[in-house]
Amino acid sequence: MTKDFFIALSQNKLLNKGAKRWGLKLGAQSVVAGTNIDEMINSVKDLNQLGISATIDNLGEFVFEEKEAIEAKEQILEVIEAIHKEQVDAHISLKPTQLGLDISYQFCLENLREIVHAAYQYDIFINFDMEDYGHLHPSFDLIDELSKEYDNIGTVIQAYFFESDENIKKYKDFRLRIVKGAYKEPDHLAMQGKSDIDKNYLKLIEYHLLHGKFTSIATHDHHVINHVKKFVKQNNIPSNKFEFQMLYGFRKEMQLELAKEGFNFCTYVPFGHDWYGYFMRRLAERPQNLQLVSKQVFNK
Ligand code: FDA
């Protein structure tokens, strides 16, 4: 019930639009690394000093106007320039709907091509985040098309989808982030039970660790992390074949601990004005995150 409530809030267009004018509110500053590039780069430098790399998300999704998609593209191009200029250890995560996938496939493809090309010049990797099921196949089509020209792209496999078993095989030669899945999906497309999702999650991670190019294990779940630690040891998976990822502001001590233990660790660093949908999805995943929020709100 709480999950549905926050997912519904995350998709509310009026609130999403309004929040862009509010600045970071409701405690979002604990999980969003600022509203501009300078603030974000400073956060990335802090992480790098701790031995942690970053994947940078210029927040935004479900864009329906060309002007807005072009603005998002320009901002991401600026982030690519900033990564190069500041020589930070970071790459980009983006959402195809932010670049106009709901406007037209071709328009989105051209925006993405420009971004991937710019990043390619500097050897910067671009991850295509995966959104809800309605955008899954168009996003894979974009990746298929762009990977004919560029090898600096990868994507996400969401373990809750029944079809993820096929997709992980199809995309085994890509750098993949594997997650449980964050959106509300119908039961004919996606598993609903936590234990089923967790089981499939481990299966997909193991498959890609053994057969894939590079695996980003993106989770805050210590059971999964402990399982992976054992699995890589038992199977002699070299450390340059995988990394752990967590979201900015979550389980900070564990992020540091994993980096100190010598594992590659990458923090997902969201920034920008369009923080609202992202923030509500985090509350949907784990209502306990509200504690984090109330601390921020009342410590003012
Ligand atoms: P889950 O929420 O299942 O929690 C399992 C257990 O871990 C909990 O019971 C608790 O014990 C512990 N735990 C979890 N969070 C904790 C916390 N904050 N503090 C203490 N204990 C905690 N989704 C998507 O659909 N598309 C995408 O592109 C991405 N991208 C992405 C990138 C990164 C870097 C991450 C970390 C996640 C995503 N996701 C995503 C979100 C993902 O699909 C999933 O919804 C969330 O990560 C929540 O699931 P977890 O695996 O983290 O643990």
Image (spheres, rainbow, N blue to C red):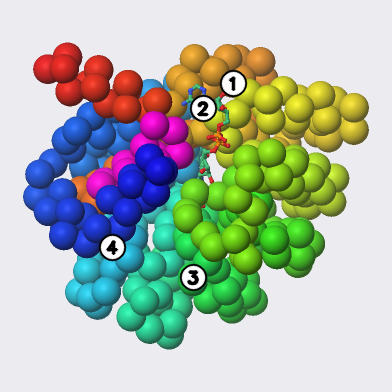
Most frequent secondary structure within the magenta stretch? helix
- Magenta stretch: give its range: 275-287
Q: Disc 4 to disc 3, how far (Cα)?
A: 18 Å
Amino acid found under the numbered disc labelled 1:
Ala
Residue of label 3: 135
* Residue at x 33% of width, y 60% of height: 61
The answer to whether the residue bearing label 4 lies less than 8 angstroms from the nearest atom of ligand 1 is no
Q: Nearer the viewer, mark 3 or mark 1?
A: 3
Q: Determine whether the residue tagged by mark 3 lies in a helix, strand or loop.
A: helix
The verdict on residue 279 being magenta is: yes
Instruction: Say which label, 1 or 4, has the lower sequence index.
Output: 4
Q: Residues within 10 Å of mark 2 (few under 14, many from 20)?
A: many
Give the x, y percent position of residue 176.
Answer: 65, 52
Residue lying at 58% horizontally and 39% vertically, measured from the top left: 218
Which dot, 4 or 3, sits closer to the camera? 3
Horizontal side of 34 relative to 270 (left or right) equals: left
Q: Secondary structure at mark 4?
A: helix
Circles 2 and 1 in contact, beta carbons < 8 Å: yes
* Residue 158 visible in the current orientation: yes
Q: In the image, is 90 to the left or to the right of 39?
A: right
Residue in view at x 23 percent, y 29 percent: 27
Q: Position of residue 46 (x, y in %)?
A: 38, 23
Q: Are marks 3 and 1 in contact (CB under 8 Å)?
A: no
- Magenta run includes residue 254: no
Q: Which residue is mark 4?
A: 72
Name the residue that disc number 1 marks. Answer: 259
**Residue under pointer 2:** 52
- Give the residue type at disc 2: Ile
What residue lies at 25% left-to-right and 34% top-to-bottom?
A: 28
What's the distance in space between the residues labelled 3 and 1, CA to CA? Answer: 34 Å
Which sits earlier in the primary sequence, circle 2 or circle 3? 2
